Image: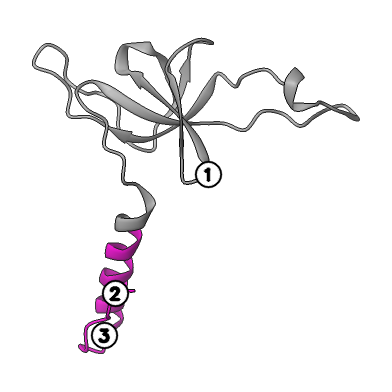
Amino acid sequence: MCQLPKIGTFLAYLVAECLILNRTIMNIKPLGDRVLVLPAPAEEKIGGIIIPDTAKEKPLHGTIKAVGQGTKDEEMILKAGDEVLYGKYSGTELEFEGEKYLMMRQSDVLAVIEK
């Protein structure tokens, strides 16, 4: 665990917490024009019927967790935190620290959901 500075201010505590969180939350950095997407959870129930895992449809939307730098031909217009729609067979499935992600190219993203 990281040692907190002895400054004694709340600001120093917040800075230390941010450094700890940034180091442990995401260690994956996509390359080029790729983005890392956390898919939205699949629906567990429809009406009163519980759907088994094998019958659940893949979600077609999610949240971008990390983005690459882009390429010289295509600049990165997506950013971390964007809610996006993507195709049914887009991306490569990854599992990192027990969480399932999709790695895909920026061009595989169909739309950004604005709230």
Q: Could you tell me residue 56's position as x and y percent? A: 72, 21
Instruction: Say which element carries label 1.
Output: loop
Return the residue nearer the eye: 113 or 7: 7
Return the residue nearer the eye: 27 or 50: 27
Q: Which residue is mark 3?
A: 9
Label 1 to label 3: alpha-carbon separation: 35 Å
Residue drawn where x is 26% and y is 37% of the image: 29
Q: Which residue is mark 1?
A: 98
**Residue 44 painted magenta:** no
First in sequence, mark 1 or 3: give its number.
3
Q: Which residues are magenta?
A: 1-21
Instruction: Say which element carries label 2.
Output: loop
Q: Quadrant of the N terminus?
A: bottom left
Q: Nearer the viewer, mark 2 or mark 1?
A: 1
Residue drawn where x is 42% and y is 20% of the image: 92
Q: Residue furthest right?
A: 48
Q: Amino acid at mark 3?
A: Thr
Using a 10 Å C-alpha cutoff, classify the residue at mark 2 as few (fewer than 14 neighbours), some (14 to 19) or many (20 or more).
few
Q: Could you tell me residue 52's position as x and y percent? A: 80, 26
First in sequence, mark 2 or 3: give its number.
2
Q: Give the number of the disc on residue 2.
A: 2
Residue drawn where x is 23% and y is 20% of the image: 33
Residue drawn where x is 27% and y is 63% of the image: 19
Is 27 situated left or right of 90 in this image?
left
Q: Amino acid at mark 1?
A: Gly
Label 2 to label 3: alpha-carbon separation: 16 Å
